[in-house]
Each structure stands twice: as structure tokens, then as C-alpha cells.
Image (spheres, helix red, strand yellow):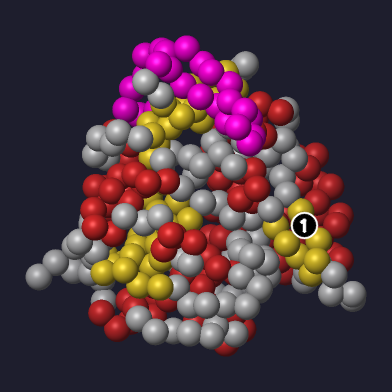
Amino acid sequence: MTSPVICFGQQPCGFYPKRFLVAKIQKARRLQKEIGGKIVFFYHDSDHDPRETRTVLRHRTTGDPAMLNFAFDNKVQRKFSPLYAKRVSEEWQAKTILQLPNYIDHSLIDIFKAVQPTNVADFCLDMYKRMGLLEDMEIVRSGDPAIRAAACDINDYYVDVQYEGETARARKTDNGFKLHEGGNVFIDLPAQEFSKEQISPARDTRLRWMQSVVNCTHYIAGAGEQDYLRKEEAPEIEFVMRDEIELSDEAFVENSKNTDETSTEKNAKGAAL
């Protein structure tokens, strides 16, 4: 029999990860203890939405929430560049370091200081690794050209193209490409040649695209994913709900090498497989 492959997926979701990501990690680790196999983190770093990396921290004295996020070089990069191409500046990191003592312990601030300011996706991934969350996991990145080349063909996708000096994630249309400005407003771009290494999946084709390279047996799904996952396209996968968790959109701010023992799991309301 094939050894189990337990997968969960997530975009970069804050420079301190959102608690719902940690809930997926904990679920995956518990399932691995039960059935064996390996864990694969499908890191969707080709997403472009800057709202994904908003990081909600609570003031240590008042308990009031604060929403922090990366600063972006320009409007094009903020709105349209994939997360692996949104640059992180030393100036932003230095300014953020000055704010963090209001919200978190120095051990976590030291981790933040140690991360090199390269791009948003690398920055977040390095943070999660340094926090001890991803040990012994295989990481598959949707922005990796080798992964894209190996993935199956899909009919609904984005293409990384050049736009005003930046890499932009544009939706492929019959006549060219579209950039979403917001609401019902789009920027039309002309057709141009592109390779498979520039393609990343849309929401409705993401599962099939991911599965063609991951070949998982079990998938840990978040609450929102249940609304759009096309499970009928992957009948070989057993879908497992992540734990329900309090304050799921807020940042996980514990420096733990063993996520099974964190207070996040203690607050989980459900662990049914």
C-alpha cells in the first residue's frame, strides 16, 4: 500500500502565522502519529492578495488588537505582484521591530530580527520555520518553476507577466490578461507568449493542480476551503477538517518547538477526523 501523504495548504498568512494555520499543522501532526506517512505543506506563495499577510497582534497591556502588515514599494507591487515577488525592505523591518515590544515577548522579536528582508513569501516561511512549526515537513511552493512545470494542465489560471516594471499575477482570458483593480474594475493587458513555468492555478483549479504534484492521500481543509474545493476531482483524497479554534484570524505568538503542547491546541474546540 502507498504510504500516507498528509497535506495542508495555505498562502503566506502574516509574518507571525495566523492561528488557523497552526491548527492545520497540529491536525496534520496528530494524524501522522495515527497513520504514519509524511506531511506536505502546499505553500501558495504565488497568491497576490496583500490582505492575506495582515498580522493581528494584541496589546500586552490593554488587549486591544492591532493590524500590522508589510509595506510595499509601489501600488503595482502591492496590488498585483505575487507574494514571492513583493519585496521586503530593511526600513520596514526596522520600524516594525520598534512596535513589537508592545505586543509580544522578546524571544519572538529576536526571531523577527534574524529573518533577512527578501520578499514577503520567503520572509513568512522563514519566520514559520524559525518558530519551530515546520520541522520534518516537505514544502511545495506554487511559485516554484519546477513545480509549475511538473503540474498538470488546467484551463483556469493566472500568469506571472511583466507590468510597469514589476511581476504581476494576471488572470488569463481568451484575448489576453486581466488585472483586478477592485470591485468590477479591471486592467486589460494584451496577449503575449508565456511558458508553463509562469502559470499558477485559480481557486477552482488549485486542488487538481496541487494534487498532480503532491499526490496526497489526506488533505487538511480549512473552513473557507470547504466552500470551493472540488472534491469530486480528487476522489482518492480523504478530506479532514482542521480544528475549530478561537481567534483564528489572529497571530500565533508562541515560540514552541512542539505545537502539540501549545495553548492554541488547548483552545481547539474540535478534533474529529
- Residue at 69% in and 53% down: 54
Observer able to see residue 80: no
Give the camera-side residue of 92 and 204: 204
Q: Position of residue 103 (x, y in %)?
A: 81, 67
Quarter occupied by the N terminus? bottom left
Check the image and report above or below for 144 versus 104: above
Give the camera-side residue of 169 and 36: 169
Amino acid carrying label 1: it is: Met
| Residue under pointer 1 | 67
- Residue at 61% in and 17% down: 165
Check the image and report above or below for 146 versus 132: above
Direction from residue 226 to residue 122 in the image, left or right:
right
Check the image and report above or below for 266 versus 112: below
Q: Quadrant of residue 172?
A: top left
- Residue at 64% in and 65% down: 249
Q: Position of residue 166 (x, y in %)?
A: 60, 22
- Residue at 52% in and 77% down: 244
Mark 1 falls on what kind of element? strand
98 falls in the magenta region: no
The crowding category of the residue bearing disc 1, from other C-alpha atoms within 10 Å (few below 14, some 14 to 19, many at least 20), is: few
Q: Position of residue 106 (x, y in %)?
A: 78, 68
186 falls in the magenta region: yes
Check the image and report above or below for 265 versus 148: below
Observer able to see residue 267: yes
Q: Quadrant of residue 182?
A: top right
Give the total of numbered labels.
1
Give the camera-side residue of 211 and 176: 176
Q: Position of residue 186 (x, y in %)?
A: 58, 25
Residue stretch rendered in magenta on the structure = 175-198
